[in-house]
Amino acid sequence: MNFVTGATGLIGSHLVLQLAEEGMPVSALFRNEIGKSEVFNLFQFYGKENLYTQIQWVKGDVEDADDMFDLTEGMENVFHCAAIVSYHKKDASRMLDVNINGTKNVVNACLENDVKHLIHISSISALGDSKGTVIDEETPRDFNDYHSNYSKGKYLSEQEVWRGIQEGLNATILNPGVIFGPNNCTRSSGTMIARIDKGLPALPAGGSGIVSVLDVVEVMVRAAKQTPTNERYILCAENIRMSELFTKIADALQVKIGKTIAKKWQIKLVFYMEALVELCTGKRATITREIIRNYDEVKQFDGSKAKRVFGFEYRNTFSSIEDTVRYYKVLSKGASQSD
């Protein structure tokens, strides 16, 4: 049996679908019924709703150590996908608790229950610092550099897995870039789609690595079928400038956005305006201090190690962007019809 945490998120929902398609029994962790209904909608989008009944849903919370012990008992593979992604200071404490302590609970449960293989979803944010060079799995992390709370949390979460490995746990760590795939437009890369759809007067600076959620899931399943390596793997199909990425998304949405790259002072101005709106109305700002700190940073990642070890080829990232946009439009249409 395979156990999936964060089964209602972007990665987890696609993973349970893939496991069901391959006839691999799956127990999926959920926190509320809304999350389960979102997964069913995703199955429908792919025309696979008949597979939904193959999922064994179990309610629980990664922050509850007893839940993790009980729910991982008898499991062969555990896929840890649960995490919070945020760059807002109001989410920092909660995010660190879930990402670090949740991973600690999963690792301890896997050790106590002699789980055969833990496959942990980390992030490129947990990796070392580039200093202008391409980042790979061995790039050292400079602790004197500035790191966002999300980066700190993912790094410390990953340290819990390394600690588990030292204590005898078999594990594989995956560090994906920015992930694209059909998902709730209020989370992960979906928020980027929604923001661009509203129109932007200018393009962002910076650059990073991106990957399809289908690639991430394929590697997870392949890892589960292979002997555990106790190593980490970057998952990056393409390194891209944010300006080019936003332009591609706008093209897929068929909306017009600006063609010039916004200056940092302009982003700061938007930050102050949104901060004032948040103070007066409570509406969350989309630009935060952490985003500004990393605004013009360009990082490149080497995702070739995963290709060699797991024997796969990365998909065309634009096709995943198109799928994400199509799903976003399906959700938007459904929301407008229900109003």
Image (spheres, rainbow, N blue to C red):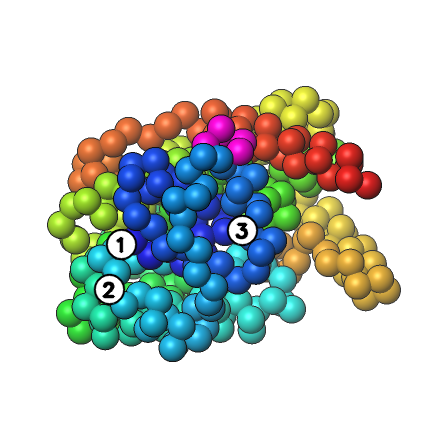
Q: Is residue 103 left or right of residue 91?
A: left
In the image, 228 versus 159, the foreground residue is 228
Q: Is residue 46 magenta?
A: yes
x then y, percent, for residue 300: 39, 41
Residue 331 versus residue 256 in the image, above or below: below
Q: Main secondary structure of the magenta part?
A: loop
Reading the image, the residue beneath label 2 is 74
First of labels 1, 2 by sequence position: 1
**What is the C-alpha distance between the residues marked 1 and 2?**
7 Å
Which residues are the magenta region? 44-48
Question: How many angstroms separate mark 2 from mark 3 (CA)?
Answer: 23 Å
In the picture, the disc for residue 36 is 3
Give the SS element for disc 1: loop
Secondary structure beneath label 2: loop
Q: Residue at x 66, y 58 (%)?
A: 288
The residue at 24%/36% (across/down) is 307
For mark 2, does the 10 Å Cα neighbourhood hold few (<14), some (14 to 19), or many (20 or more) residues?
Answer: some
Which residue is nearer to you in this view: 215 or 255?
Answer: 215
Q: Where does label 1 land, which residue? A: 1
Q: CA distance from mark 1 to mark 3?
A: 20 Å
Give the mark nearest the N terminus, 1 or 3: 1
Q: Is residue 75 magenta?
A: no
x and y percentages locating residue 119 in the rendered image: 28, 55
Residue 309, by quadrant, is top left
Q: Quadrant of the C terminus?
A: top right
